[in-house]
Each structure stands twice: as structure tokens, then as C-alpha cells.
Amino acid sequence: MAKLADKPFRARPERYWMNIDGAQHTYSRPGVLEKADGTEEPAIIIFRDRYVLSVLPIEDAIRLSNEIIDATERPAI
């Protein structure tokens, strides 16, 4: 049985232009992650248009950026 990582995700063709447009409007900025105890830590905020998609602690932002780079170096097709 193939692992999930071995089987590439396939975006549906009817969503092609929505995906392209969304990618062009996705960006990141530095931010602050406020903890429940009132302390803060640096974070990366990922936006699409002006909407927050994700707030990532720095360690996870670095992990994700490395995974993105790895994926571009070994495309699924």
C-alpha cells in the first residue's frame, strides 16, 4: 500500500484558475503569536488577499518552507 506522501495530490481541473489566482494573492508577513499566559513569540502569518490562512511559529514556518523547497526540487510529474 502506498504511503500518502508517495501519492501526489491532484487538484481538480475545474479549479485550475481559482488555484492560480489564489496562489498569486498568497503572501506572508512577520507577526506575533500571543500565548495564553500573555507572553509573545515571533511568528509568520500567511495571507490570501487580506485574510489570514495560518499563523506559524518560526520553527514550523522554517519546516514548511523546507518542505516547499523539497517539493519544487522533486515535482510529482
Image (spheres, rainbow, N blue to C red):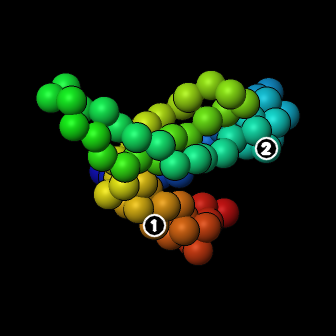
- The residue under the point 55% across, 40% down is 46
Seen in the picture, residue 64 relative to 23 is either above or below; the reply is below
Dot 1, crowdedness within 10 Å: few (<14), some or many (≥20)? few
Residue 56 occupies which quadrant of the picture? top left
- The amino acid at mark 2 is Gln
Residue 50 or 66: which is nearer the viewer?
50
Observer able to see residue 72: yes
- The amino acid at mark 1 is Asn
Instruction: Report x, y in % for residue 19.
Output: 74, 36
Residue 76 or 24: which is nearer the viewer?
24
Residue designated by label 1: 66
Q: CA distance from mark 1 to mark 2?
A: 20 Å
Observer able to see residue 2: no
Residue 52 occupies which quadrant of the picture? top right
Badge count: 2
Residue designated by label 2: 24
